[in-house]
Image (cartoon, helix red, strand yellow):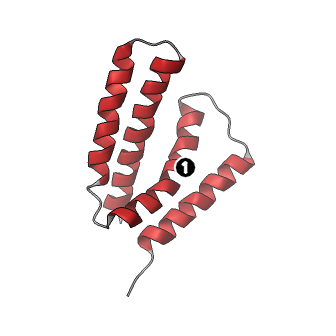
Amino acid sequence: MIKAILIFILAGLCEIGGGYLIWLWLKEDKPIVYGMAGGIVLILYGVVATLQPAGFGRVYAAYGGIFIGLSVLWAWWIDGFKPDRYDLLGALLALIGAGIIFFAPRH
């Protein structure tokens, strides 16, 4: 379970970080090297996600909730965005849903 959570976090950091670098390049007039680095990091995201033991559909469905939670944290810590209680509640609900999808016992 801990390994799966760590893989989700690493995948999220790759996806959000890569997207953020491309955002900085295109929206904040940073040098093209930001965009190229972002593209490489996004490719890494695709590779990291395959390290999960579950099938594609379940991994990506659960990852959606993880992505929401990590995006709120990224925006808060990196971009200076101050989440309100609805941002936090929505992220918490998404994380609970991701946990149910990925970790619920199945027969």
Question: In this image, 35 relative to 78: left or right?
Answer: left
18 vs 6: above or below: above
Q: How many marks?
A: 1
Query: In the rendered view of the protein, which quadrant contains the N terminus?
Result: bottom left
Q: Position of residue 30 (x, y in %)?
A: 45, 13
51 or 5, nearer to the observer: 51
Task: Classify the position of the C terminus by image quarter.
Answer: bottom left
- Residue at the spot 52% in from the left edge and 37% down from the top edge: 74
**Label 1 crowd bin: few (<14), some (14–19), many (20+), radius 10 Å:** many
9 and 31: which is toward the camera: 31
Q: Is residue 31 above or below residue 82?
A: above
Residue at 73%, 50% in the rendered image: 86
Identified by mark 1, the residue type is Ile
Residue farthest to the right?
85
Q: Residue 37's spot in the image, x, y percent?
A: 32, 25
Toward the bottom, the furthest residue is 107
Q: Which residue is mark 1?
A: 68
Name the element at disc 1.
Answer: helix
Q: Is residue 42 left or right of residue 82?
A: left
Residue 14, by quadrant, is top left
Query: Relative to 46, is 74 above or below?
Result: above
Residue found at x 46% / y 61%: 61
Q: Residue at x 53, y 29 (%)?
A: 78
Residue 41 position in % (x across, y down):
32, 34
